[in-house]
Amino acid sequence: MLEGFLISIPGVMVLLLGWCGWVLWRRRSRVRLAEGAGACVICKTTFAEAQITYHGEVTKAERAALDRFQARFATFKIHCHECGTINICTKDGQAFRALTGEGG
């Protein structure tokens, strides 16, 4: 019985490590998709030409500030270094709302 427990711990660790790698790969692929498809809402510079930074998922508080239709499709945020805004994007990489330094 003890041998089965000792064997299962490394197996679970490998599965957990694989899952973490998949999550990181998925987030990186979303940003790559946005680079090819999207453009900044304010300066209209495509994400492929601009210097961008991934800012994570859209929080519940940020979703509450959006209208119902926008909140449904808001997935992640990208910071455009050309104009300094944070763009809220769909899962396809299309930016539809920009949050400026003044609060949106």
Image (spheres, rainbow, N blue to C red):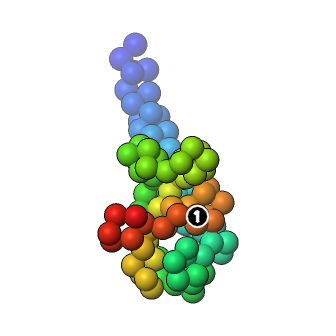
- Residue furthest to the left in view is 102
Number of marks in the rendered image: 1
Instruction: Please name the amino acid that badge 1 sits on.
Output: Phe
Q: Tell me the quadrant of the picture where the C terminus can be found.
A: bottom left
Work out whether 68 lies above or below 43.
above
Mark 1 is surrounded, within 10 Å at the Cα level, by few (under 14), some (14 to 19) or many (20 or more) other residues, namely some
Residue at the spot 56% in from the left edge and 61% down from the top edge: 89
Is residue 29 something that shows in the picture? no
* Left or right: 48 as drawn, with respect to 53: right
Q: Position of residue 47 (x, y in %)?
A: 57, 78
Q: What element carries label 1?
A: strand
Q: Quadrant of residue 35?
A: bottom right
x 58%, y 66%: residue: 95
User: Along the line of sight, which residue is nearer the eye, 16 or 102?
Assistant: 102
The single residue placed furthest to the top in the displayed view is 1
Task: Locate residue 20, reporting x and y percent.
Answer: 46, 48
Residue at (44% x, 44% y) in the render: 64
Q: Mark 1 points at which residue?
A: 96
From the viewer's perspective, is residue 9 above or below residue 91? above
Q: Residue at x 46, y 47 (%)?
A: 63
